[in-house]
Image (spheres, helix red, strand yellow):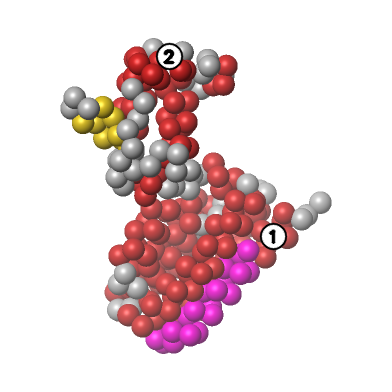
Amino acid sequence: MSLLKETKAESLADALVQRFERQILNGDLKPGARFPTEKTITEDFAVSRTVVREAFARLAARGLLTSRRGSGAYVAETARYRAFQITADEMREIDDVLKLLEMRIALEGEMATLAAERRTAADLAAMRDALAAMSESEDMDASVAADARFHGAIAHATRNSYYVRITEFLGVRFVPSRKLYLGTNDEDAHRAYAAMINRDHEAILDAIAAQDAQGAREAARRHMEKSYQRYEALRHAP
């Protein structure tokens, strides 16, 4: 089977990396499993040993492969966790944004609940700083970054490192692209949209500051549900 026909403009090493990543994610190659030998891969995919070694090096750099001297290459024990990601490319389609928002409805509600119970004055200050930056920003990308900081500050206020890690891992991808929703770079449209989002954020912050756990949960869920409804309507727009 020639891999060249499948890759077109992609490099052969990229194609091998993508193939093995898929096999790891779908469970065909489980943590601890041995990768095929270089000889087997070169024969099965009609590529050189140089291509195979480059692919293995990239997989190792991504934490998906470990080498054992004299034994070969193996799927890293933590590969399934390290392989998980949400890329910027995936967030260009409305259906994918909706999937992310479905996850966030539950996640944000729980984070806000814990934040209301555990927040400190420093946490509240970080949330207010992020809202101020978002309100004052005239740049869409900077505003999105401030939006992500606000949610990151809520995660820190939970005192649960796993919430912090998932929000940091997702970064600005935690906030769907406004260009996708607005369909424009118009500054007036951006400011109006940012003001609407900030009103929701202020309601969440007020509840967290008041240590109203139930109110924080409801405000966070309402914020995410409204976002979901906006993108759902966009999906059905003519």
Answer yes or no: is residue 61 visible. no
Residue picked out by circle 2? 43
Q: Circle 2 sits in a helix, a strand or a loop, which is it?
A: helix
Residue 6 circle label: none
Q: Residue at x 30, y 41 (%)?
A: 32
Most foreground residue, 136 or 20 = 20
Query: Which percent across, then down, holds residue 167?
Result: 40, 59
**Amino acid type of disc 1?**
Glu
Amino acid identity at mark 2:
Glu
Residue 200 belongs to the span the image colors magenta: no
The residue carrying pointer 2 sits among few (fewer than 14), some (14 to 19) or many (20 or more) residues within 10 Å by Cα, namely few
Seen in the picture, residue 199 relative to 80 is either above or below; the reply is below
For residue 232, the mark is: 1
Q: Which residues are magenta?
A: 209-228
In-front residue for pair 80/159: 80
Residue 238 sits above or below residue 232 on the image:
above
Q: Is residue 140 left or right of residue 29?
A: right
